[in-house]
């Protein structure tokens, strides 16, 4: 059985806009993206929304629903009461282009700053050999669909615009961790994670993990292990003494 739902949708650009109320028909089994499409077809043909696969695999339709960062295509209408007002707004951390579409170019800038996979110099393409046990830890991170919901909810950049230059966010710290754990990657990424990507600014509140649609344990399996590796490098007294002796002998 269908019913009429009350929607409140952000309309406008980054410098000016407002929440506009709509009443839209809902049918059984639909998701929020279905309702946004119906709204475009029946009442607001100029409503801007980014989407592609409608299957939770492209990460395009990221937005905030009742204040929670979510994928429009993976949020079922059955999770809301029929008389509930559903508020749909763009991701708050990024500049609004128009309506529900945000400028996520910050993330691509940060992606380019991550040093690429660095295999052994004498290893030729086609000669890579790894056991499954060697890649199990980092394989989880490959499920990322780059919806940037973790970036959006991370309060280090969500609430502090000034941190964006120094902090890459959970998605790209996870990428650094993935490469650091890769059995064939030869680059030492511990100092880079701390000094260039701002790992120390993360205070492991797990808000990134909570909104991940792929259920990646970003905090427990990527960020905390990287913090442990950095701490082992910089603050372990045995390592500290070894570095001092090595530098003295080298001098």
Image (spheres, grey):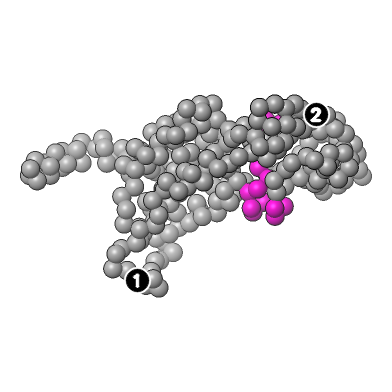
The Cα atoms of the two marked residues, 2 and 1, are separated by 58 Å
**Which residues make up the magenta segment?**
52-68
Tell me the residue that label 1 is attached to: 124
In the rendered image, the quadrant that contains the N terminus is top right
Residue 43 horizontal/vertical position (percent):
87, 39
Tell me the number on the disc at residue 20. 2
Residue drawn where x is 42% and y is 46% of the image: 113
* In the image, residue 64 lies in the stretch drawn in magenta: yes
Q: Residues within 10 Å of mark 2 (few under 14, many from 20)?
A: few
Q: Quadrant of residue 38?
A: top right
Residue drawn where x is 86% and y is 45% of the image: 41
Residue 81 horizontal/vertical position (percent):
82, 34
* SS type, badge 1: loop
Tell me the number on the disc at residue 235. none
Residue drawn where x is 70% and y is 53% of the image: 52
- Left or right of 73 on screen, residue 183: left
Q: Residues within 10 Å of mark 1 (few under 14, many from 20)?
A: few
Q: Quadrant of residue 89?
A: top right
Looking at the rendered structure, the number of numbered marks drawn on it comes to 2
């Amino acid at each position: 059985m269908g019913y009429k739902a009350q929607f409140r949708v952000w309309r406008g650009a980054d410098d000016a806009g407002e929440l506009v109320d709509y009443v839209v028909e809902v049918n059984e089994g639909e998701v929020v993206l279905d309702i946004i499409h119906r709204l475009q077809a029946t009442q607001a043909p100029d409503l801007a929304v980014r989407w592609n696969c409608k299957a939770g695999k492209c990460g395009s339709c990221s937005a905030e629903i009742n204040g929670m960062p979510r994928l429009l295509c993976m949020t079922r209408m059955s999770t809301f009461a029929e008389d509930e007002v559903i508020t749909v707004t763009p991701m708050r951390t990024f500049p609004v282009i128009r309506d529900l579409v945000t400028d996520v170019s910050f993330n691509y800038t940060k992606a380019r700053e991550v040093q690429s996979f660095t295999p052994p110099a004498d290893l030729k393409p086609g000669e890579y050999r790894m056991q499954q046990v060697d890649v199990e830890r980092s394989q989880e991170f490959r499920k990322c669909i780059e919806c940037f919901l973790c970036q959006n909810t991370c309060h280090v950049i969500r609430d502090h615009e000034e941190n964006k230059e120094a902090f890459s966010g959970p998605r790209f710290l996870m990428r650094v961790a993935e490469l650091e754990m890769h059995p064939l990657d030869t680059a030492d990424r511990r100092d880079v994670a701390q000094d260039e990507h701002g790992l120390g600014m993360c205070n492991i509140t797990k808000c990134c993990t909570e909104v991940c649609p792929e259920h990646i344990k970003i905090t427990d399996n990527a960020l905390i292990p990287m913090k442990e590796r950095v701490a082992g490098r910089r603050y372990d007294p045995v390592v500290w003494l070894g570095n001092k002796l090595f530098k003295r002998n080298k001098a």
